[in-house]
Structures are given as structure tokens and as C-alpha cells.
Image (tube, rainbow, N blue to C red):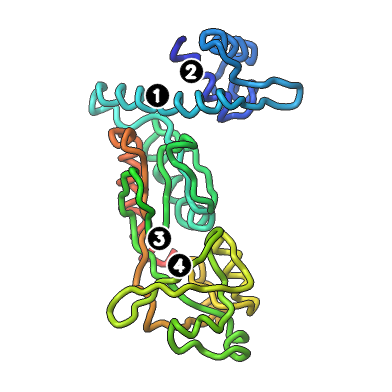
Amino acid sequence: MQLDDMRIYVATIDAHSFTAAANRLSLSKQFVSRRVMALEEALGVQLLIRNTRKLAVTELGQEFYERARRILGEVDDAEQAMSSRRAGPRGLVRVSAPMSFGMMHLSPLLALFLREHGEVRVDMELSDRTVDVIGEGFDMAIRIGTLADSTLIAQKLADLRMVACCSPGYLRRRGQPATPADLARHACLVYGHGGAVSWEFLMGGALKSVEVHGPLRANNGDLIRDAAVAGIGIARLPDFIVADALSRGLLVTVLDDYLPARTSVHAVYPQHRQSSLAIRAFVDFLKTGLPARLAAGA
């Protein structure tokens, strides 16, 4: 089995077709197809199901893809470690990030980063689901809020202020919550997935969790903000999502005396990728760029 064949296979899965992979690698479609077939023969398993419409990955093919991405990442890291310091960061970094945060803050910073680091390629997937970084072959993920326990390395990038808010019309109808405990009788717009969701508040000098319920649960902050503007309920979101609506009077804050001042934005990545110069360069760039951008209210 050749390492180049492994690279071609990973590129084919990432591109979802032989044609797109061939264009990305500057090879012919026929060559790419032949090398993937040679890889299957060398492994003695079927990796792909081919039909006239699209490629489908077999279960073994998906497992091999995830392992191959990790191996190729380690090979790239080893090559960088052995190369001259003057070579600088290079290679592909596959990143997962939240949709709204990615569009508003990562997008302009990413363009600046790529201009400075011409040998680095970034494959950015914007999604509000919590990806399995290792299992899905990501090199890094950007996460907001409290981190779950894991083996991933976490680097703090910046702080965000959290805001509890609702529309003026909602307040007129339902009244002002005086304490976090009052949220039990209010409609709360919940960011999260299945199961109970709690919001953290500062009460008596300590952080305490209050379980919340309401008519809407979603995994996108913009959607929750729009529901709050429409008067559906109370939302608790990072200020970058609601700042414009607050400045225009479409939303007003509540429970200001109880909210934690900040939550954090982290970059998380697998331990086997910590030596990657490209990942370290991207993390260092975001550590500088994000706080400055957030402080400027961009």
C-alpha cells in the first residue's frame, strides 16, 4: 500500500467524487479511480460503492478514511518537525466551528490568516452541532461555553459576554423576572440538544444552574434571537448575536445582576495534532485576532 494512494483516497472522500478529487489534486479522473481500486486490492476490502450518480462509502471505507486522515496528519507533522524552521506552517487543517460565530468573526480573520500563511490550507465546516473531533477526522474545533471532559487539548481564545434578553412586548405581557428562579414561570428559548437544559447565574457569589423550559429549542443562536425579537420568550445568548437587536431596541436585557460576566471561546484539538505547526499558527493567530475583534464590537 502506497502513502500516495492513501492521500488520493482521503481526497476522494473529502471531495465526494473522483472528478472533484482529480481536479483538487491536478490528476486525471481515470488515474484517481485506478489508484483507489489499487488501494482496495492491497487492503482486500471494498472501500467505496460506485454507481452512476455518486460514491458511497462502505463501513470499512469510513473506518479506513478516519484512520488514514490521522496517519496522514501525523506524517505531515513529522515532515514539518524535520524540515527547516524557515519552512513555516503548511498543510491542511480541517476545522469545525459554530455557524453564527464563524460567519461573523472567523470569516474575516480566516482570510487574513490565509494571506499570511500561504502554505496552509483550511477546510472549514460551519455547524452548530458538537462534532466528534477525532472520530470525524477534524484537526480542530472552535467551541463556546463550558467544555465537556475529554482527552482533547483546549486553548482559550477569547471571552464572550452572555446576555439574557427578550422583546419589550414580551415584558409587557409576561412581566419582568426578578430573580433566576422566576424563569420557571417564563417561556425560555433554549439553545441545545435533547435532554434538560440549564442556564448559569451568579447567585450569592457562586454560579448556580437553573433548569429552563419553553416553546423553542434550537442549535442556532440567530434563530433563537429572531424568536426572542418576535416576542416568543426569553433568550440567553452571547452578546455578539444580540448586540444589534439590543441597540435597535428590538430586545431588552433582563437579570443583568445575576448573569456571569463572561463565557469562553476555546480551540480544541487531538493530542496527536499538538505538534502541527499549522494548527499552532492558526490557534496563535486567533488568540490575538479574536479578542481584538470582539473588543472592537465588530
Report how far apart the C-alphas of labels 3 and 1 lie in the structure.
31 Å
As shown in the figure, which amino acid type bears the numbered disc 1? Answer: Ile
Q: Mark 2 or mark 1, which is nearer the start of the sequence?
A: 2
Q: Mark 4 or mark 2, which is nearer the start of the sequence?
A: 2
One can see residue 118 in this view = yes
Q: Residue furthest front?
A: 195
* Residue 145 placement: quadrant: bottom left
Query: Which secondary structure, mark 4?
Result: strand
Q: Nearer the viewer, residue 121 or 15?
A: 15
Q: Mark 3 or mark 4, which is nearer the start of the sequence?
A: 3
Confirm or deny contact between disc 1 and disc 2 (CB under 8 A). yes
Q: Quadrant of the C terminus?
A: bottom left
Query: Which secondary structure, mark 2?
Result: helix
Q: Name above or below for residue 184 compared with residue 242.
A: below
Q: Assess disc 1: are there few (<14), some (14-19) or many (≥20) residues with their C-alpha within 10 Å of its C-alpha.
A: some
* Residue 62 placement: quadrant: top right
Q: Mark 3 or mark 2, which is nearer the start of the sequence?
A: 2
Query: Which secondary structure, mark 1?
Result: helix
Q: Nearer the viewer, residue 12 or 22?
A: 12
Identified at 57% across, 64% down, the residue is: 222
Report how far apart the C-alphas of labels 1 and 2 lie in the structure.
9 Å
Dot 1 corresponds to which residue? 71
Dot 3 corresponds to which residue? 145
As shown in the figure, which amino acid type bears the numbered disc 3? Answer: Gly
Report how far apart the C-alphas of labels 2 and 3 lie in the structure.
36 Å
Dot 2 corresponds to which residue? 6
Report how far apart the C-alphas of labels 1 and 4 lie in the structure.
37 Å
As shown in the figure, which amino acid type bears the numbered disc 2? Answer: Met
Dot 4 corresponds to which residue? 238
Q: Assess disc 3: are there few (<14), some (14-19) or many (≥20) residues with their C-alpha within 10 Å of its C-alpha.
A: some
Q: Position of residue 276 (x, y in %)?
A: 32, 33
As shown in the figure, which amino acid type bears the numbered disc 4? Answer: Pro
